[in-house]
Image: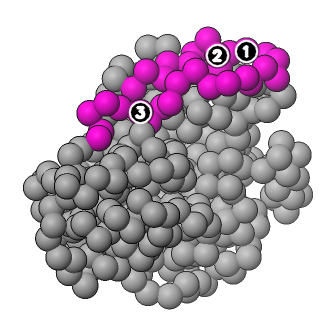
Amino acid sequence: MRLIIRDDPKAVAFYTANYVRQRINEFRPTRKRPFVLGLPTGSTPVEVYWHLVEFYKRGDLSFRHVITFSMDEYVGLPRSHPESYCAFMHRHLYDHINLRAENIHMLDGNADDLAAECQRYEDKIKEVGGIELFLGGIGPDGHIAFNEPGSSLESVTRVKTLAYETVLSNARFFGGDVNKVPKLALTVGVGTVRAAREVLLIITGAHKAVALAKCIEEGVNHMWTVSVVQLHPSAMIVCDEDATLELHVKTVRYFKSIEQVQEQLIGRQHIGLKGSISKLARTDPSHSTGSALSPADASVTSSGVDSSNSGGDSISQQSADEDVSDSGDSLHSVSDIDDEDIGSTTADVVASPSANMPAGSSSDTNGARVNNSLASAAAVGNPF
Ligand SMILES: N[C@@H]1[C@@H](O)[C@H](O)[C@@H](COP(=O)(O)O)O[C@@H]1O
């Protein structure tokens, strides 16, 4: 699992939107090979959607060959109600981009047969080849989509009764009146999210700090359904500093150090967006700091730079902090092609000349350092 920590919700949104943009562009979707994207509601993703709309307007991102599935929907709330998740998705994203109407999938909370509606959704996801990237948020009780505490970790799309804490939390969207909040919802299951090829969660705010700590530092537990991402081979959480308040200091330092160590040892240009590592940036020991590794550093070398880790502790995430105009991956026209003409990629979306930080740089504020022996070991192909 990757944990990306940024200063505040704005930086989280910018990072996340850039990551989604890069994933779609790198995938180079076509009509025959569309990019299937799962999407959440809630206040957290609003700014992410704003950025995605901006990327689209600037010609840096096309949704022409993107298929979307929303995570959930209230039961019994008319689709035209401003707080229905259908209305939310149109208001914040769908009405502003070139997503084809037939590629938008949402659950119908007013269907005559709710069970059949849920089955239809699961079938549709399978029909399009599964979800490539599921973007999600969480509730303060650690629910993902509307999978409340106690949900089966194998669950699929179904009707769910909302927990009181969720009803309280969502009352803010209904004038603060808990009585106006629907008590039932349709939601993709925990298993549906797990089945996606990649899961990206955004978690911000001190009120979600306990949930994040349960997710990262404790075991997989159906009472904190977000914790299931521990079992996912390609999961990433992007959070702000406030959300880390209940994490151990060493946990925060470790995840922050991964980015820094990899920047020094590998360089962004050698790391794929999802964390695959091609080679090291620099192997000349004379450029290293020569400082000794602390125990915390040692753990970084054993797992943080392990290219065999399919979860991929990637530094490529740092490119997601950059302004889109710097990354040279404007593939609007390419994304709009209708054929299966994928061909060779036109741009390394994570490449950045400035990314190759000198190994001797002293910018590492988290105690992670690169020493001679580490660089040498890497040079002879030591798999860390
Ligand atoms: N069903 C949605 C969740 O999918 C979402 O993650 C959560 C977070 O909302 P917010 O981002 O406003 O905290 O809201 C609802 O409960």
Residue at 68% of width from left, 55% of height from top? Answer: 197
Q: Main secondary structure of the magenta part?
A: loop
Highlighted range, magenta: 327-356
- Magenta includes 344? yes
Picture quadrant of residue 48: top left
Q: Which residue is mark 1?
A: 337
Picture quadrant of residue 253: bottom left
Numbered label attached to residue 334: 2
* C-beta proximity under 8 Å, tags 1 and 2: yes
- Is 321 located above or below residue 242 in the figure? above
State the quadrant of the C terminus.
bottom left
Give how far across and how far down residue 362 sits, in percent: 10, 55
| Residue type marked 2 | Val
Residue at 36% of width from left, 20% of height from top? Answer: 325
* C-beta proximity under 8 Å, tags 3 and 1: no
Residue at 43% of width from left, 21% of height from top? Answer: 328
